Image (tube, rainbow, N blue to C red):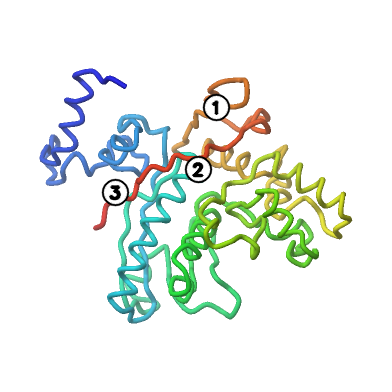
Amino acid sequence: MRHSSRFWLVSHHYVSLRVDIDGDGVSDAWEDSDGDGAFNIQELMIGKNPANPHDIVGYEIVVAVMFDASDEYLSRLAQALCLATCYIFDYTDGYAIISSIKIYDNVKEGSPEYNEANVRIKDLPEGVLGQAVYRAFIEVDKDVLTESMEKFVYVFGHEFGHYAFDFGEEYKDENGKYYWDCRNLPRKLVDEGIITVMGFGLWEIPTEKLLECELSTYDDYQRLKEIIEEYGYECSWRSHQWSKWVSRGLNYGFCWYSLIYELTHRTRPVYPALVVSDMGVVVFSDVHDCLIFYEHLEGPFTMVSLYLWWP
């Protein structure tokens, strides 16, 4: 692609990191001109518009490590969070990014650092890998990172889905029955390639495929329904995620449908432009039933972690 001279002028303006038009002591590159949570330089480098407040949403993460971690653990945590940034940007097809990460070590409950943090790495009850509350906090068990970086990224990405987008669970049905209690249902989902961020196929997904998980589509649920009916599994195809959002008045409950609703109904909304089947590019200013035809992108595989801000 050939760019105009203005593109290169703007690129130089931001990438130089020296320009400070408003004189506040902060380079314009590391300011957020459009107020969407992503810094100007980040948007420019990942193909977004620093002047458009509706093309991406950025999240600042403050991490409280609730124990005295080794330098090796902290280094590994920073690497894992960089990978998680890419994973989240990937599974939202480029409409959400972690823009800033700050890590505090050996944090005590009730301290200023604890109160500032929206992510906590700590001991959780046995069997609990992570938990989150919408727009409040994320918690991940400290041993997950020690076991596997990919597993940590998957767990963090899953909990981020609760925290940022209010997703429900897809490893249990509308009645609270876990799909892994339905004989070999998760194994069949993995064999069909139905592995999702919010839990389809959970516990049967190979470690090397954890970061290939995507948000659920309408087709994923159609195939889940067919498998349950074909093999007589005693569970509902309507997951906790599906029933949660349908009970709120949406027509469907797959993750891509509720994500578009969530993004377009924010105080500062995001209007995704998605290629939908034969319809071409559709710009969404609200949720729409044509999303049943949406197939998520395989990428974008953009190394957004290269442009993180580390305060």
* Amino acid at the residue labelled 2: Thr
Q: CA distance from mark 2 to mark 3?
A: 18 Å
* Amino acid at the residue labelled 1: Val
For disc 1, the neighbor class at 10 Å (few under 14, some 14 to 19, many from 20) is some
- Residue at left 27%, top 38%? 40
Percent position (x, y) of residue 13? 16, 32
For disc 3, the neighbor class at 10 Å (few under 14, some 14 to 19, many from 20) is few
- Residue at left 18%, top 38%? 15
In this rendering, the answer to whether 122 lies above or below 135 is below
The image's mark for residue 275 is 1
In the rendered structure, the answer to whether residue 130 lies left or right of residue 16 reads right
The image's mark for residue 306 is 3
In the rendered structure, the answer to whether residue 10 lies left or right of residue 211 reads left
The numbered mark, 1 or 3, whose residue comes first in the sequence reads 1
In the rendered structure, the answer to whether residue 75 lies left or right of residue 56 reads left
The numbered mark, 2 or 1, whose residue comes first in the sequence reads 2
Q: Nearer the viewer, residue 72 or 59?
A: 72
Percent position (x, y) of residue 33? 27, 36
The numbered mark, 2 or 3, whose residue comes first in the sequence reads 2
Q: Quadrant of the C terminus?
A: bottom left
- Residue at left 41%, top 38%? 56
Circle 2 residue: 92
